[in-house]
Amino acid sequence: MIPVHAGRPAVRVGLATTLGLGWLVAPSVVAAHGTTGPVPVLPDVLLAWSFDPTIVIPLAVLAIGYVLAVRHVDEAHPTNPVPRARTFFWLLGLATIFVALQSPIERYDTTLFSIHMIQHVLLMLFAAPFLALGAPITLVLRTVRPETRRRVVLPILHSLPVRIITFPVITWVLFAAVMWGTHFSPIFERSLEEPTVHQFEHLLYIVTACLFWWPVVALDPSPWRMREPARILYTFLQMPQNTFLGLAIISAPAPLYSHYATLGLDWGPGPLGDQQMAGAVMWVVGDLVFLVAILGIVVGWMRREERESAAADAREDSARAAIRERETRLAERLARERGES
């Protein structure tokens, strides 16, 4: 068990946020993925982008496929096109994954724990909710033929395995378990030395995060639908575990991973200071993202109630108008009957 001291975390967080990323201008040579090859530093580091086909090609296919599907739906349903915001968020989510895995962040992720943590935050707390805001399942349902939707897509969506893996309690536990399990198990250390394990870790982050954010965003159909109060509670309960995880990393009295401790860098904040910065990133950014998500749910809840209230008022107005019309017709008929008599 890693002790969490009461007074020290706040001081360390303050120092970490003050330091920021200023140390990036200092290094001269660092190693990537356990190799001895140099990684460029500022200003050259800004051009240190990677282009791994196993990452770039799937992202490109997902981007192009989504855009083509949107065009197909818009042409087939010009009066009910796909909202542009969904396309924007989908492409933003894919771009966030690209930045996390192919930008200079990837070149430093096995050299600095704080950069590695930024990578994790981008994948789990930014890319995943952006993808959920793209509502890809809804787009698939609108793109495929009715027969395919009825016989293939909907049966899969409501199948027992999908119902189990998307049950909100399970998705919440998976999200938290992956965060704790990867940071406090041999998996993290191995990911720093073995690129295959590192790639599997990234895939694990994206999949579990997408499962977690699916019911939070609630744009796509799901076997489990939660009302706004449940979604708020579901999201809010991630904050304590995220905070405690960040504080556990900040308060660790020694470096958690020998990989970072044995690099022997002659620049930067040092292994322990770098680790404290990583914990601060997880704590502060994570809690802010969850708070923004909760605010978004509340705003959406208020707007939905306003729409429902306006629709109810419209129905009542229509009913009152129909009653008045019937009363008018009855009065006219009675008047005619009196005149005839």
Image: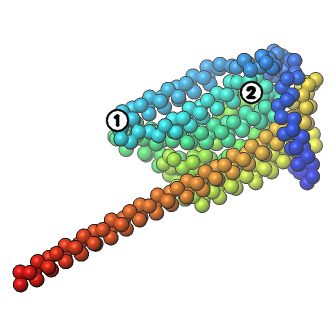
- Quadrant of the rendered structure where residue 180 is? top right
Question: Can residue 113 be seen in this snapshot?
Answer: no
- Quadrant of the rendered structure where residue 99 is? top right
- Name the residue carrying label 2: 105
- Mark 2 or mark 1, which has the lower sequence index? 1
Label 2 to label 1: alpha-carbon separation: 41 Å
In the rendered image, the residue lying farthest to the top is 37
Q: Nearer the viewer, residue 304 or 34?
A: 304
Residue type at mark 1 is Ala
Q: Residue at x 90, y 40 (%)?
A: 15
Q: Residue at x 60, y 23 (%)?
A: 56
Crowd around label 2: few <14 · some 14–19 · many ≥20 (10 Å):
many
The spot of residue 129 in percent (x, y) is 61, 42
- Name the residue carrying label 1: 76
Vertical position of residue 20 compared to residue 300: above or below: above
Residue 116: which disc? none
Q: Nearer the viewer, residue 52 or 296?
A: 296
Q: Do the residues bearing badges 2 and 1 touch, measured as CB atoms within 8 Å? A: no
Q: Residue at x 39, y 35 (%)?
A: 74
Local secondary structure at mark 1: helix
Question: Can residue 272 be seen in this snapshot?
Answer: yes
Q: Nearer the viewer, residue 300 or 195?
A: 300
Local secondary structure at mark 2: helix
Residue type at mark 2 is Ile
The spot of residue 186 in percent (x, y) is 80, 37
75 horizontally vs 210: left or right: left
Q: Residue at x 73, y 48 (%)?
A: 287
